[in-house]
Structures are given as C-alpha cells and as structure tokens.
Image (cartoon, coloured by chain):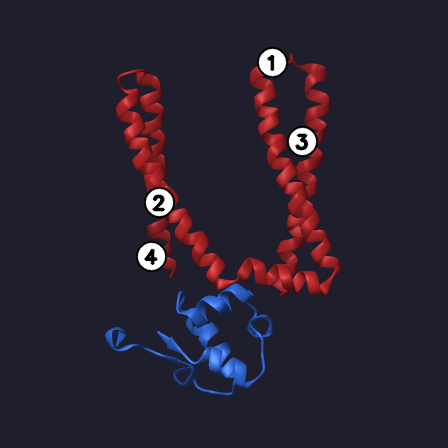
Chain colours: A red, B blue
Amino acid sequence: MEKFKKELKSRVVVGFGFSAIIILINIFVPMFFETSFKNGFVVGMFSGVAILAFIMAIQAAKALKDPEKLRKLYIEEHDERELEILDRAMKFALKFTLMLGLIATSICMYIDTKIAIGIIGTICFMSLLTFGAKVYYDKKI
Amino acid sequence: METRLPELRKMNKLTQEELADLVGVTRQTISSIESGKYIASLPLAYKLAKVFNLKIEEVFELEEEEV
C-alpha cells in the first residue's frame, strides 16, 4: 500500500503540474503567436489530456486523505480480473488496429501515397514496439 | 475449474462484497469466479482458501479435461 501511496503522490504532482503548464500555455500562446487552426488543434489536444490528468490528480488527492477511498481505489486499480479484461481488450484493439491499418494502406495507396506511407510507417512502428516489448518481457518474466 | 466458493461463503454467512473486501478484489471478481467465468490466480486462490482456513484444493477443483 505504501508503494501505491507513493504512486498516487506522484500522480498528484504530475497531474496538477501538467494542468498548470497547459493553463499557462493557453493563456500565453495566443499573446505571442498567431491564432491558427493548427495551433488551436495542438493546444486543444493537450488541454484534453490536461483535463484527464487533473481529474486523476483530484481523485488521487482525495484517496490520499481518506483511507477508505484509498483502499477502494487500490482494489479498483489492482483487481486481477479488471487487469485481465484490460489486457485482453488491448490485445484485441492492437490486432484490430493493425488489420485495419493494412486495409487502409491498400485503399490509400490508390488515393494518396503519402497517407499510405504514413499508415504503413505507423503499422511498422507498432509492430516493432510490440516485438521489443515481447523481447523485454521474455527476459523479465 | 469447479469451486466450492458459493457454498463456503454461504456457510460462513459472507456476502460476495464482504469476501471481496477480505481478499482485496472487486465483488464482480468473486461473482465471476463463483460462476466459473473467471479462474482465480494462484495468489488469489490462496487468499480465498485462507479466509475459510482450507487448502486450495478444498476450495477449487480441476475438471477432468483440465487435468
């Protein structure tokens, strides 16, 4: 439980810190840079992540103050069935994404080669990452 | 995998929620183990057996085709 408490403390620091940085960027970027769709998109994307990080930080801070909430959060995050469900869902999503990527590459090759190369590059990167992770866990477990 | 978990839980007058709390999992996990949808890991099976002061093989039993 002490390890989990440490993890929650770092979640609070990272969550609030990241949110604060994004708020500052939201305030200062429009002052010094021209407002464009591209800038707005990037800032908006990071703002979405910051909102999630902020919610998680609040949840962690509340759990750190209340032992009952801490215990419930620990069970929620460490429940072996939930972890297995997540694991299976991610495996399925990865296989599905790779298959869909291959189909999308085949279609895009006839429409826009640059997009097709972008997708196949992503597929290769994901496959390499999966292979790398497999090699790592082969040695670790 | 067959389990005597529902029987043992009722004998000890425990709800799924209470048993889940004792072994540190969610109620849904206990429910899934009882219905045979999910097979508990070895540490969890050990914890469950310990709650009832029994051995793992007295709580869980492999079916013929699993042996």
Check the residue under mark 1 and report the chain it is in: A
Residue behind mark 3: A22
Tag 3: residue type? Ile
Packing grade of label 4 (10 A; few <14, some 14-19, many >=20) is few
Residue A36 horizontal side relative to residue A129, left or right: right
Q: Is residue A62 above or below residue B5?
A: above
In depth, the one of A20 and B45 nearer the eye is B45
Tag 1: residue type? Ser
Where residue A114 sits, quadrant-wise, is top left
Q: Quick check: do tags 2 and 1 share a chain?
A: yes
Q: CA distance from mark 1 to mark 3?
A: 17 Å
Residue B3 percent across, percent down from the top left: 41, 78
Q: Which residue lies at the image location 57% right of the left edge and 22% below the top edge?
A: A41
Q: Secondary structure at mark 2?
A: helix
Residue A34 percent across, percent down from the top left: 65, 12
- Give the residue at the far left of this rendering: B65
Check the residue under mark 3 and report the chain it is in: A
Q: Quick check: do tags 4 and 3 share a chain?
A: yes
Which label sits in the foreground, 1 or 3?
A: 1
Q: Earlier in the sequence, mark 4 or mark 1?
A: 1
Residue behind mark 2: A130
Residue B50 horizontal side relative to residue B56, left or right: right
Circle 3/circle 2 CB separation < 8 Å: no
Q: Quadrant of the N terminus of chain A?
A: bottom right
Q: Earlier in the sequence, mark 4 or mark 2?
A: 2
